[in-house]
Amino acid sequence: MKFYLKFVVIIFSLSIFAQSNDEFNKKPKLVIGIVVDQMKYEYIPKFWNKYGSKGFKRLVKDGFNAKNAHYSYAVTSTAPGHATVVTGTTPNYHGIIGNDWFNPSLSKEVYCVDDFFKNSVGTSTDEGKKSPKNLQTTTISDENRISTNFKAKTFSVALKDRSAVLSAGHTSEMTYWFNAKNEGRFITSSYYMDELPDWVESFNNRSNIFKYISKWDTYYDIKFYTESGPDLNKHEIKYLGKENSTFPHDLEKISKKKNGKIDYDVIKYSPFGNDIVKDFALDAIKFENLGADEITDFLHIGFSSTDHLGHRFGSNSVEVLDMYIRLDKNIEEILNYLDKEIGENNYLVYLTSDHGITHIPSYLSENKVPFKQLYSMNVFNDKLKKYVKDVSNYNVYLNKDKIAQSQYSLEDIKTLISSELKKEPWVYDVFDFEKLDEAISYSEDYGINMVYYNSHPDLRGDLAFFLKPLWHKRSSSASNHGTGRTYDTHVPLVFFGKGIKNGSTSKKIYVKDIAPTLSTILGISFTALSTGSPIISAIK
């Protein structure tokens, strides 16, 4: 009897161990990262009553909603945002300090993903000469591939090349972006492959692409669009050559050029740019067998049309509201497809943005919000200009050769330039990078931290400045972003699916926390220079 009881206990223990071990190792088959370009957090509660029950609302109600997620650096633009999401760290480590930047060692401006040693694939233009060579650490999907001995797959797609390339990381073999202009094709780089797969060539078929160029009218009756301002107003810029920017927008008519060619740019300046990315991503799941086995794959989706449109119409426009109503339907379709093809409890989704956006400055000023625009950051007098090599991403790069030939010391010039900058009404403070490393170790100054975390040692200037609140650099756009203020740093962050606890938090967290949270759920190494922390309250 004793022997029998011992045998039963052993068998029972082994059974429990096997079950717990299976549960411990059970991971989502597919992780889907959705980054909505220029989506500020406010768009979730503000447009809530216009969303259906199975898109954004499903993510929020059944997932984990971080209501107070922020970027923690000064230059809030597309490239640093996408890099921060997937690397779990800030530009001072991952090296993507802007969409472009001045490279001191080359003495010229460089674009974040340009790589002229690579060849274009899928186009005869140079638009495919891209790679992640400037990304100076690993990404979450890189670590996932390493952990699985490179059996896991990584797929990335966006309208913008920088969104697709930086999200995908170094080890992706399937990364695509949309070359609009006169081509209207998804393309890639020889960094990833030598030729497009048959299914991509099929997707790029002219008649297939042309279906995304059609009349754009409001999804619902425009009289119900009470969350936005009036459709006709003086603050928006003209839409693709139209006399005014009111609905409807006949994209087919607008796209036809006098020479008979089609301008496929109209796709990216409309909600149909989100449609085409969504459709391409769903085809990728099917044709590349993403999430088809027990090895976790990654799918990165970058919805870029929201940014293209937001710049032109501003966040209070009917166009932006209508685009998010339609994007909600895109999210619903993605979730429904995942439920059917991958299985409801077999995937994990996170949704965030690469940066926020302010309202149109003229609209704010008209309503007594003292928002101002500066015309140039290069404000130095003739005496000092010759000692300044470049001004880029709030950095001032000095011409040390000219300073050495002058009667001034380097410190003299730094002092003179700092004094000149501090006279400007838009400058909050000026920092010397030689002293910043020491200052950062004990200072909680907001400006110092935001500038420091945006400055990579190989790329930083000699001085840096920080903007005052309610100031923006003037551009050809109606509205802009790119500062370290909350209207640009505060973005949505929602986790949903396998391994995620249902709930929410109003505690301040950072976008750099996304990658370590995923690493913890997947049981894989953190990215090589991770400085974020897992969001424990989001993990089951």
Image (tube, grey):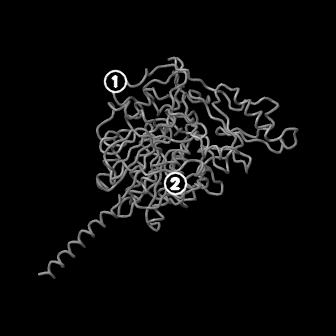
Is residue 34 in view from this perspective?
yes
Query: Of the numbered discs in the image, which one, if any, rests on residue 244?
Result: none
N-term mark: 2 or 1 = 1
Tell me what residue is drawn at x 44 percent, y 40 percent: 508
Residue count near mark 2 (Cα–Cα under 10 Å), binned few <14, some 14–19, many ≥20:
many
**Which kind of residue does numbered mark 1 sit on?**
Phe
Using the rendered image of the protein, determine whether residue 211 is visible from the camera's viewpoint: no
Question: Count the marks: how many?
Answer: 2
Residue 530 tag number: 2
Q: Which residue matches tag 1?
A: 224
Residue 44: quarter of image: top left
In this image, 184 relative to 62: left or right? Answer: right
Q: Which quadrant is the N terminus positioned in? A: bottom left
- SS for callout 2: loop
In terms of secondary structure, where does tag 1 sit?
helix
Which image quadrant is residue 410 in? top right
Residue 484 located left or right of residue 285: right
Q: CA distance from mark 2 to mark 1?
A: 45 Å
Closer to the eye: label 2 or 1: 2
Give the residue at x 65% y 37%.
Answer: 394
